[in-house]
Image: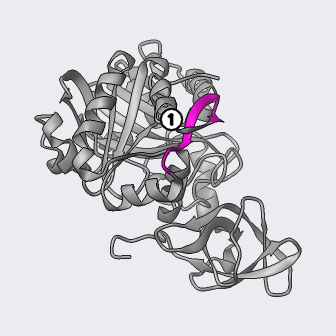
Amino acid sequence: MKETALTHKHIELGAKMVPFAGYNMPLQYSGLLDEHHAVRKSVGVFDVSHMGEFIVKGPHALDLIQKVTSNDASKLTPGKAQYSCFPNASGGIVDDLIVYHLADQEYMLVVNASNIEKDWEWIQSQNSWSDVELKDISDQTTLLAIQGPKAAEAMQPLTDVPLSELGFYTFTKGKFAGVDNVLISATGYTGSGGFEIYFDNANAEKIWDAVMQAGLNYGIKPAGLGARDTLRMEMGYCLYGNDINDNTSPLEAGLGWITKFTKDFTNSNALKAQKESGLKRRLVGLEMVDRGIPRKDYEIKDANGTPIGVVTSGTQSPSLNKAIGMGYVATEFATEGTEVYLDIRNSLIKARVAKFPFYKEDN
């Protein structure tokens, strides 16, 4: 298994370590509930250095990105980032990602850990421009997600960058914890605000220690994959391999907002035709009415026990104290409030279709 530059720190902190996407990663430290509530109420920090980072540079860098991604990257200016996906040639999704416009003719693509090799091969295969340079910097990059409503206040002493003024999906480079050239991005996967910071592995220990020290008076908690999953699920954010994959259309997955038909991209004509002819299924939120927790691959049925879909993610929501899930259902059952049933151990357990996000700040 691979290790991040901070694996030894997690072990020292007593984290429960698990294999994930080929890495030895922390699942939890003080406990999933403790870590989850720290992010919702104050500040938590995740080591997500297992994610992949590719640099795309050159006169036709934008042309390549426009070809391989569904969103319109021409709208980006340096200092802005954008959520997007790589459509494949058969109607599904190679991966979802964030595109950062670093400078003129230079971009960074941040991809999922489990898909680094697949994505790298995909973008290389799509690059028909000799003046576009591709560089995989994943193994030399540390990425921390410092998340929560107190993140800006807690981290401000570490940088001259006015953190509270960074708009959502914008970023800058600056000095952080005495380290130059740290990319500070107002992005995250939790729905509770905060930042993601990218820097060289050589500075990982110094920055981790500084972040933990700066957050001390705010009750900062190191957080693991368990809390990351419950936090993203409360927001209805897709997890690649569960809610989206090579066989799910971005339109079915509710990602029409990042699928821009104002340009041509991989398989755009087929996706446009799918939109025009109408979707046969949709990704929806599920709130349990009866007792039970939705689990991946549970069948979703109608009142007569006829299969109408499948669960892709589910958990007991720590913020809402109720069981929630995500899954695909036939379009006629996708309306908010529709009663559906999960087949749990051969019993039909009632749920209702819910709107994303499940969690709102006033919950």
Q: Is residue 59 magenta?
A: no
In the image, residue 281 above or below residue 180: below
Residue 286 position within the rendered picture, expressed as x and y whole percent measured from the top left:
62, 73
- Element at label 1: strand
Compared across the picture, whether 97 is left or right of 273 comes to: left
Q: Which residue is mark 1?
A: 111
Report if residue 228 is visible in the image.
yes
Q: Which residues are magenta?
A: 18-30
Residue 150 versus residue 289: which sits nearer the camera? 150
Name the outermost residue toward the right.
346
Answer with the quarter of the image where residue 76 lies.
Answer: top left
Residue 299 position within the rendered picture, expressed as x and y whole percent measured from the top left:
80, 68
Residue appearing at x 59%, y 49% in the figure: 269
Residue appearing at x 32%, y 51% in the figure: 43
Compared across the picture, whether 358 is left or right of 95 comes to: left
Residue 219 versus residue 150: which sits nearer the camera? 219
Q: Which quadrant of the rendered structure holds the N terminus?
A: top right
- Magenta segment, principal secondary structure? strand
Three-letter code for the amino acid on which mark 1 is drawn: Val
Residue appearing at x 50%, y 64% in the figure: 234
Q: How is the image coloured?
A: one colour
Q: Which quadrant of the rendered structure holds the C terminus?
A: bottom left
Residue appearing at x 48%, y 71% in the figure: 358
Residue 48 position within the rendered picture, expressed as x and y whole percent measured from the top left:
46, 36
